[in-house]
Image: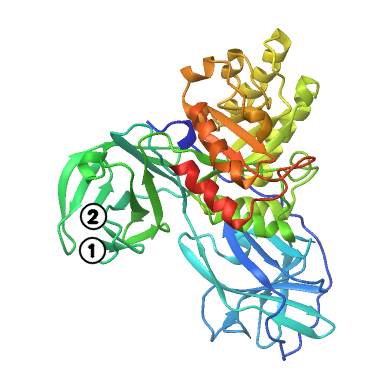
Amino acid sequence: MLQVKKIFWSARLLALLALLGALFVMPFSASAAPLRSITSYQASNDASNVYYQFQVSSSWSLYRVYIDTDQSTSTGFAVGTIGADYLLENDILYQHTGSGWSWTQVKGVSHQVGNNIAHWALARADIGETATPNTTDLIFQVETSGTTETSSKYTHTFTSIDRPVYTSDYDTASMDYGFRQKVSWTTNRVYIDTDQNASTGYSVGGIGADYKLEGCTLYHYAGGSNWTFVRTVGFDVTNGLVTWSDVPRSAIGESSLPNSADLVFQGASSGSSETTRKYTQKYSNRFSQHLAIPSYFYPGSTGAAYWTQLESSAPNVGLAVINPDNGPGSSAQGVYVIQAASTQAKGIPVFGYVRTTYGARSITDVKADIDHHFAWYGVEGIFVDEVTNTCATADIAYYQQIYNYIKGINADVPVVINPGTRVPECYASVGDIIINFEDTYANYVNWQPLGWEYNYPEEMFWHLIHTTNTSDLSNAIALAKQRNTGWIYVTSDILPNPWDTLPTSTYWSDEINLAWQ
């Protein structure tokens, strides 16, 4: 069975679409300047909505996305190397009609510009892109006083396979695999490249698969399009989550430690299929620690680089936290909607920050924050902060009510609680992951758990260690492993906010390697 650290999914809920009005604007200058300003452009989607975003180095009057839904340069408005059928210009969606610069207003959409990041959220149905899988070609553009800058073509694939549910070794004998569907497929597969050689095995998704899981059966590649039966395995599809369980590592020749294999996940129906990007599974002789990041940096300006650094480190980074405004904020913030989708698409579960003021905050307000995180940002877990640390009846009842409320929304959504210090065992019933240390390295050296923690799996505990010099990083990770800790984050950053940056590249790579050893 997939355990709590592996079950990080949720169906993305509808983002808020504001219906705004605006005046039609005149066409851009035919002579576009060389690309200098537009960077980090991207698109993502859930079952109902599509999200666009790009970053600029300065402020502009007009922000545009040209959308070529039929991917034909002979139809639509010619811009860059596409023929645009739709145009997003600031907060208005237009459809191309006639020839040349001829557009008809469709509707107002959700559009925000903040910290030099422009982002949009709109319904897929508004541009006729409800089918999955499907693709569109995009051009991003900005304009001020007749001067324009235009991006290169970007192709967005509408996905129906959500991110893979990344797996780790819960024992040395068997593995579990899984991914989250956005639509139902007739056939579900995992391709496993045990020698990590794309030139051998069955070619699929950039790997050379030596084994295949299809439904409840494990196969070994036999050349061409042929596969040989190996054995049956546990298989289940429930609420869109596809899982394979208790797959013997010996059956795929992966019993040595340490070891690794490349994987791709695939769904197929009636001749069509969709395949995920490659994922590298690392086998360990113990529960390998994952980095869990309280990522309190804005997804723009200098913070954008931190998000890129975090995303590029999947699956070693196993959890990130968004905190738009000491919680979800008073309304959906488009930049966080897009960032959450982007991070999730890299296979990193995103949790939503909720404060409790050590039990003094209204339960009604706490529940509202939880609801907003799910509805606005599609989070896959809740991070409950400012948690008490005594077994007082009122304290435990307060956090039990929060825990039960989250589980009532989705029983499989993980709940992090953050007392930041040692807590009695009574807190094991109100959180799936407990942060029982949040302090400096100097205070961590002689710190010890109370003892009851060793009766629970490592993945139930998370330590946050700041103000740590490079020379002390290795010892910090080693101490965390000795103290039954499955989730870890160590940083050289200091108070008052040690969670608003990420470490430098060398520190970061060393931390990842030490955690996985």
> Which image quadrant is residue 49 in?
bottom right
- Relative to residue 182, is residue 505 drawn left or right? right
Q: Earlier in the sequence, mark 1 or mark 2?
A: 1
Identify which residue is drawn at 81% across, 74% down.
60
> Which image quadrant is residue 495 in?
top right
x, y percentage for residue 118?
Answer: 73, 64
Identify which residue is drawn at 64% across, 67% down.
40
Q: In the image, is residue 206 above or below residue 214?
A: below
Q: How many marks?
A: 2
Q: Which residue is mark 1?
A: 200
Q: Residue furthest top?
A: 393
x, y percentage for residue 171?
Answer: 34, 31
> Which image quadrant is residue 383 in?
top right
What residue type is disc 2 on? Asp
Front residue of this view, candidates 472 and 460: 472
Q: Which residue is mark 2?
A: 210
Q: Mark 1 touching mark 2, by CB under 8 A?
A: yes
x, y percentage for residue 172?
Answer: 31, 34
Q: Residue furthest bottom?
A: 31
- Relative to residue 187, is residue 412 drawn left or right? right
Mark yes or no: residue 506 visible: yes
**Crowding at label 2, few (<14), some or many (≥20) Cα neighbours within 10 Å?**
many
- Relative to residue 184, is residue 32 drawn left or right? right
Front residue of this view, candidates 514 and 453: 514
x, y percentage for residue 185?
Answer: 37, 50
The circle on residue 62 is none
Q: In the image, is residue 263 above or below residue 409?
A: below
Mark yes or no: residue 300 visible: no
Q: In the image, is residue 96 above or below residue 493?
A: below
What residue type is disc 1 on? Thr
Q: Secondary structure at mark 2?
A: loop
